[in-house]
Image: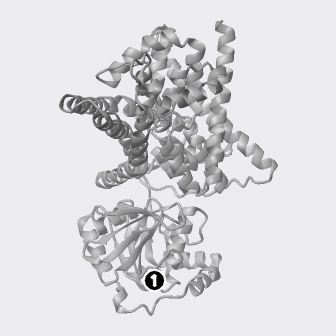
Amino acid sequence: MTASRFALLGAPNCGKTVLFNGLTGSNAKVANYAGVTVDRREGRFVDDPNVVVIDLPGTYSLRATSPDEKVARDVVLGKLGQQPDAIVSVADATNLRMTLRMVLEVKTLGLPMVVSLNLSDVARHRGLKIDAAKLSELLGVPVLETAAIDSRSMRAVREAVARLPRKTEGAAHALTLEEAEKRLDALDSNALYAQVEDILRQVVRHELTLPAWHRQLDAIVMHPVWGMLILMLILMLVFQAVYAWAEPVMGMIEDSFAWLGDVITENMDEGPLASLIKDGILAGVGSVLVFLPQITILFAFILLLEDSGYLPRAALLLDNAMSRSGLSGRAFIPLLSSFACAVPAVMAARTIQDPRERLVTIAIAPMLTCSARLPIYALIIAAVIPDETVLGIFNLQGLTLFGLYLAGIVSAGFTAWVLKVLARKRGHVQQFPLLMELPTFRMPNFKHILISLWGKVKAFLMRAGTVIFALSVVLWALVSFPGAPEGATQPAIDYSIAGHLGHLIQPLFAPLGFTWQMCIAMIPGIAAREVVVSALGTVYAMTASSEEALETALIPVVHDNWGLPTAFAFLAWYIYAPMCLATLATIRRETNSARHTLMITGGLFAAAYLFALIVYQIASRILG
């Protein structure tokens, strides 16, 4: 029997995802809508496996202004496959005026519908009284007052959903695509708003009164000075957590894979198979898993700030500053994600309405220092920057790392500004004002956060991890074959395919001061930037029991053989070079354009070469 399809529709931050988790359990799957780059989540209804619940992207209206909203509209109309058999509409009880308009839009399509008046507990607590029975009478559909975190109200929604008509009961309600579009296009916005106001007059008994603490908190966090200071403190806490809290777990992961490598070495004869398992498969898996703690912590903070209602306020706070570079506060969340990994950052840019702004955000995201650059930065800084105190309180090595972060941020902002100026000359700039409904502050739903966190981590593993793992195996072959001939005097990698490629491209990088060893190490680094450190260890024929030991062994080698100009140029190269195929694959997927992907990749490589050249030439002249 063909499954019925119920669509879950609601505005952002209305509790829709929590409701989806309650209707489907935690067995939802994530995929892409055919022909577009927006994810869909769907799962089987827990009370009837013959019903598929589809979680549509958050939208305020079926009159779409962003890719996410267009997907929601197209699914409801049946443009992306079969039209849903029924709609579960999630309305925000604390902001009914905002969400009623969309409920009325959906109602014109004639689809069976149930309305979940979510956050009703918060609304009641703040003095708002809504006559749900009267609202149901006026809308002509069931309306339930719900709190998605309450088991009783969740049960009531499930019972109401269970009563919605199934596919097998006939689909006389369904309109053709042309009829549905005509009905939506025929809606008069002024008449719709008037109808919303008329309904509100009849169903709302008392206006929402925000508690004094809420108003006071809003006044502080949205203040141009104090709000910015609070935001900076929160970001400092986030990054401290990302790098300090994650370090012990990352060390445990590294030690575990080093132990597994030792087990392989002790129990298998030396040869290609043992090398494939240890240096290919284990290295590939380890290079993905070692950064999971950082990515998990960053995602957890973002979800926590979003669920509490703070993140939209941070976006509004930064909108004025970001608008000078041609971006809006909408780009804040994607760019913040870039400090962990550019893959989720590029994916998060899909919520930006303006296509030009979305493309610019995707293009500059790789410039912001992701966690994969840290092993390279740590090695070079330890090798060439003295461990000294500056002005009595600052560590010189720490200041250098901060400077690298700052260089990425400034470069991203400058690039966005240049692209805005170029677009304006061609008359292509249409910068949308940042308009969003601010949700009320509320206690985060930790169960929902954990479910969403697992979904994001799993998506990262599937999208980025599979690419890195596969390429790690391919690159293992490049650095392993052909083997060194008998009586060879150089490291084995020098005789491999990667070694030949490194020697081949070395003249191209000679103006940057790069040696052939550096060029060879950059080739396996294409899979993931952090692989460069272990590749350098291989090139210099060094062995170590762990990444930390390898870095310690490499420090004097880099110090004695590279020189300051070369080391600085290498750092400049990795500020810009997009040497992470997982990121490039995600850019291709999100832009749905090979041309844009090539332009972004070429632009980043050109910037990396240009700035590394400038740094090397200037440093060579200053330092002799």
The answer, for residue 82, to whether it is visible in the render is yes
**Residue 130 figure quarter:** bottom left
Question: With respect to residue 84, does 599 lie above or below?
Answer: above
Q: Looking at the picture, how far across and down is residue 370, in whole percent?
A: 48, 35
Residue 464 located left or right of residue 253: right
- Between residue 300 and residue 527, name the one nearer to us: 527
Residue 287 x, y percent position in the rendering:
37, 36
Under mark 1, the amino acid is Leu
Q: Which residue is mark 1?
A: 139
Residue at the spot 45% in from the left edge and 20% down from the top edge: 379
Give the vertical position of 330 relative to 80 (above or below).
Answer: above
Height in image: 301 above or below 434? above
Q: Position of residue 77 (x, y in %)?
A: 53, 78
Residue at image location 64% in from the left, 56% down from the top: 354
Write down the quadrant of residue 254 in the picture.
top left
Left or right placement of residue 566 versus residue 394 in this view: right
Q: Nearer the viewer, residue 463 or 239?
A: 463
Left or right placement of residue 327 versus residue 57 in this view: right
Q: How is the image coloured?
A: one colour
Image quadrant where one finds the N terminus = bottom left
In the image, residue 171 lies at what x, y percent?
A: 42, 90
Image quarter (top left, top right, bottom left or bottom right) of the C terminus: top right
Q: In this rendering, is residue 74 above or below 321? A: below
Task: Check the image and name the residue furthest to the front.
Answer: 486
Q: Quadrant of residue 606?
A: top right
